[in-house]
Image (tube, grey):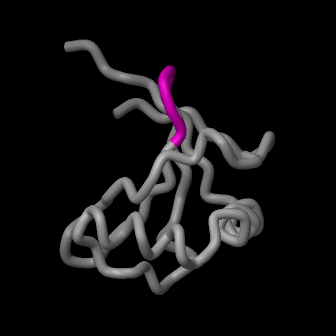
Amino acid sequence: MVRNIVFRNNDRFAIKHLLIQIGEATLSHNCRNKKLNKPRQMNQFYLETDQHRTMLKYRYPQKGVEGIMQVDNYDLPENGWIRVRV
């Protein structure tokens, strides 16, 4: 069984900075397109990157983890990435 390796970042300051760059309108638009409720808690956001893309993800209480949008074109943090096998 081959496991994928991804890197995750839970730095609240970096995620808050990213959310400001994205803007409320873009975030709401992406949530509507994926039929997701608008996220409410900062501590449930995280970034996940693999070989191909970096995603902004959110842990929903009932649905579990959902990828909200690809964020490769935004300023991403340099520090705080943790290697995880999934």
Relative to 66, is 27 on the left or the right? right
Secondary structure that dominates the magenta span: loop
The quarter of the rendered structure image containing the N terminus is top left
Q: Residue 68, image x and y in percent?
A: 40, 59
In the figure, residue 15 lies in which quadrant? bottom right
Specify whether residue 51 is painted magenta.
yes
- Residue 70 magenta: no
Q: Is residue 12 left or right of residue 8?
A: right
Q: Position of residue 82 (x, y in %)?
A: 61, 40
Q: Which residues are magenta?
A: 50-54
Q: Nearer the viewer, residue 55 or 46?
A: 55
Q: Position of residue 32 (x, y in %)?
A: 31, 72
Please report the residue visible at 74 percent of the width from the left and 60 percent of the height from the top.
14
| The quadrant where residue 58 appears | bottom left
* 30 shown above or below 73: below
Q: Residue at x 44, y 25 (%)?
A: 5
Identify which residue is drawn at 48% across, 35% down.
84
Q: Is residue 62 left or right of residue 84?
A: left
Residue 29 sits above or below residue 47 on the image: below
Q: Nearer the viewer, residue 25 or 79?
A: 25
Residue occupying image coordinates x 73% and y 46%? 76
